Image: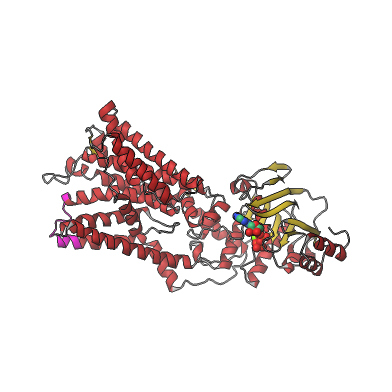
């Protein structure tokens, strides 16, 4: 019965005012990105002073933002999965294998890089689909499914060519579009060479914004949140929760593959070990630092990109202001644990409201 | 509104739904054995039974959430097979589940429109029309006289009764042909219960929507229902019209329910030929 047919009745019931806790929660959940952005800015100021102005130099920023880009793509993909209540630990292996296949096809069969890149991304999507189907159909926890996939893929990629990195050719316009070179001290920021050093970050920013649009403004995003927030309820109301999970695994695989490809484009080399074992944990840390719940149902991809910037800044900045690389890991580890504890606290407040 | 205000359901009102010989087991647990129910156009049917009798299981089969082991469902004269709740909803069968099926992390208005979102085109993309959904949700809740702090607040932040009202409102919104309510009054206060019963009574008066109502309170059953089906250990033990039965009789039959024989005996004693 459409509302226009019946005449409006008087409102009954009293408006229930929000308590302080609820207000704080609403504020925190509404401005998650802003909260983490504040952390990022404080960090930048700290490093900028600590390094006598070196931190915000174009050359150093090109390194931090390059790391931010590849980490941010994987973190944002991880956010989509974490919202559905799943996780993918095989993304670092996809990050390695996709560009490796691209470079291998190029040097052995002369396949254009653009075609190889497409194949690489499709491989990532396919691996994601397999992860998703195993997780959903056989009810294997994704933590287990994807650890298995991690070793499986890593094993394949190192045995293809004896663990040797492959030098990828430079092709235009492929490299101009997807990544060309690192920033040289001699470059001017506003030169062609200066700008293309930031290509990986720009790609990440654009793709993360697209993902944010999908998450917040489409039925797909709504159903992704529904799946992770209340999977039984979502199913009861007709959300295809299994499909939502599989699709998000596919997105994650595609994103990781693409991140690997722009990484290789920039370094003009495909290293079978490019996706270090730390890559996925760092991406998950970036996601949580950025305000994504470990319990599912809630997350922000833009927060994840800013979280990736925080992690990349810590990684590079601490070394820059004179800390030993090993010491910087201690700080990073502590920051991750603190972020996880905070995240759980927020979740506890959030879920306490559930009857 | 009083029961007397509503004329009895006409005898030749067509059967809109027939579930026949439905059985369902979960592993070793047998939830339903050979259950058959019939629902007429415009009828309000009460489904009663002890905890664990299989009421929710039966309506989850109707809503497409579970698939029956055996048995058939005939809706509007056609045999139907629901592979998922989407299928049932597409056929005009709306369900308020006992657990409400609300998404805590989504706003009230997103919950109202989950699965049938409004869209608008933007740069060739199919984006959610949040403004329209927000307005429609607000308008509709006002129409039903349901008051909540804001349609923007996430369902998490609402009280149990408010959530139940949202779930009921959502199910009525799409003008269903068959409305299934699994304990829709469980968390409601006295006034809110009366309000929701009033909504059901409205539907009953118009005789457009057929309703299956699961309630434990017999007062309420006699207020708004035309017929009662008593489910006992997975079987329909009694099928009686509320006009022919009194509350006391029903309570006696239900309380005797230690076995099918005892129920039959009690029913025969109360009113020969009832079963
Ligand atoms: N998904 C399931 N898996 C296993 N057993 C189930 C499942 N759903 C229901 N059951 C069992 O089926 C039986 C009937 O349960 P059902 O929920 O239909 O009862 P009910 O009549 O709705 O009870 P209540 O009045 O408490 O809501 C119970 O024994 C229950 O344990
Ligand atoms: Mg039940």
Let me know if residue A54 is in the magenta part. Answer: yes
The reply, left or right, for residue A262 in relation to residue A77 is: left
Identify the residue at the far left of this view.
Answer: A186
Residue A28 or residue A345, whichever sits in front: A345
**Residues shaded magenta:** A46-59
Q: Is residue A99 visible?
A: no
Identify the residue at the far top of this view.
Answer: A109
Residue B207 or residue A313, whichever sits in front: A313
Ligand 1's quadrant is bottom right
Name the residue: 16% across, 42% down. A191
Name the residue: 23% across, 55% down. A315
Residue A101 in picture, x, y percent from top left = 31, 34
Residue A316 in picture, x, y percent from top left = 20, 54
Name the residue: 81% across, 59% down. B240
Q: Is residue A69 visible?
A: yes
- Looking at the image, residue B151 lies above or below residue A244: below
- Looking at the image, residue A12 lies above or below residue B123: below
Residue B85 in picture, x, y percent from top left = 60, 49
Identify the residue at the far right of this view.
Answer: B272
**Residue A56, located in which quarter of the rendered image?**
bottom left
- Looking at the image, residue A173 lies above or below residue B36: above
Let me know if residue B180 is in the magenta part. Answer: no
**Residue A176, located in which quarter of the rendered image?**
top left
């Amino acid at each position: 019965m459409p509302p226009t047919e019946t005449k409006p009745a008087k409102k009954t019931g009293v408006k229930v005012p929000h308590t302080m806790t609820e207000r704080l929660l609403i504020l925190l959940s509404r401005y998650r990105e802003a909260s983490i952005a504040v952390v990022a800015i404080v960090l930048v100021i700290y490093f900028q002073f600590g390094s006598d102005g070196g931190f915000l130099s174009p050359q150093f920023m090109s390194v931090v933002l390059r790391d931010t880009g590849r980490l941010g793509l994987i973190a944002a993909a991880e956010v989509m999965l974490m919202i559905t209540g799943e996780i993918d630990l095989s993304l670092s292996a996809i990050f390695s294998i996709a560009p490796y296949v691209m470079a291998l096809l190029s040097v052995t069969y002369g396949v254009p890089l653009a075609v190889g890149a497409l194949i690489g991304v499709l491989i990532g999507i396919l691996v994601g689909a397999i992860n998703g189907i195993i997780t959903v159909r056989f009810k294997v926890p994704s933590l287990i499914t994807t650890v298995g996939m991690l070793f499986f893929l890593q094993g394949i990629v190192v045995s293809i060519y004896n663990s040797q990195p492959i030098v990828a050719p430079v092709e235009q316009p492929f490299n101009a579009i997807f990544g060309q070179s690192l920033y040289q001290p001699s470059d001017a920021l506003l030169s062609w060479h200066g700008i293309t050093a930031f290509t990986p970050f720009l790609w990440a920013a654009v793709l993360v914004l697209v993902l944010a649009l999908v998450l917040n403004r489409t039925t797909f995003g709504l159903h992704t949140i529904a799946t992770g927030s209340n999977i039984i309820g979502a199913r009861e109301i007709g959300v295809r929760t299994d499909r939502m999970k599989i699709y998000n695994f596919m997105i994650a695989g595609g994103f990781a593959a693409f991140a690997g490809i722009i990484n290789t484009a920039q370094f003009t080399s495909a290293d079978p070990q490019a996706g270090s074992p730390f890559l996925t944990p760092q991406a998950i840390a970036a996601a949580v630092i950025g305000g994504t719940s470990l319990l599912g149902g809630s997350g922000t991809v833009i927060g994840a990109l800013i979280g990736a910037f925080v992690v990349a800044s810590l990684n590079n900045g601490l070394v820059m202001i004179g800390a030993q690389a090993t010491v910087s890991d201690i700080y990073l580890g502590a920051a991750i644990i603190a972020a996880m504890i905070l995240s759980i606290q927020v979740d506890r407040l959030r879920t306490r409201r559930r009857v | 509104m009083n029961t007397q205000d509503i004329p009895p359901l006409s005898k030749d009102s067509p059967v809109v739904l027939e579930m026949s010989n439905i059985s369902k087991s979960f592993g070793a647990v047998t939830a339903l054995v050979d259950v058959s129910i019939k629902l007429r156009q415009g009828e309000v049917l009460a489904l009663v039974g002890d905890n664990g009798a299989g009421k929710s299981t039966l309506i989850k089969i109707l809503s497409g959430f579970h698939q029956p082991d055996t048995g058939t469902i005939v809706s509007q004269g056609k045999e139907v097979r629901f592979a998922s709740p989407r299928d049932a909803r597409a056929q005009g069968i709306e369900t308020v589940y006992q657990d409400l099926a609300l998404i805590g992390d989504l706003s009230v208005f997103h919950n109202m429109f989950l699965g049938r979102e409004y869209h608008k085109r933007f740069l060739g993309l199919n984006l959610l029309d949040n403004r329209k959904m927000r307005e429609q949700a607000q308008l509709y809740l006002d129409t039903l006289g349901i008051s909540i702090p804001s349609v923007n607040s996430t369902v998490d932040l609402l009280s149990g009764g408010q959530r139940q009202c949202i779930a009921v409102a959502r199910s009525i919104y799409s003008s269903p042909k068959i409305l299934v309510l699994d304990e829709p009054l469980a968390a409601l206060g006295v006034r809110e219960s009366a309000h929701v019963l009033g909504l059901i009574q409205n539907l009953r008066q118009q005789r457009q929507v057929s309703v299956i109502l699961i309630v434990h309170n017999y007062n309420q059953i006699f207020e708004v229902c035309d017929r009662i089906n008593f489910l006992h250990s997975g079987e329909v033990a009694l099928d009686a019209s509320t006009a022919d039965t009194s509350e006391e009789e029903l309570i006696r039959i239900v309380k005797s329910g230690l076995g099918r024989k005892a129920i039959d005996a009690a029913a025969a004693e109360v009113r020969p030929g009832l079963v």
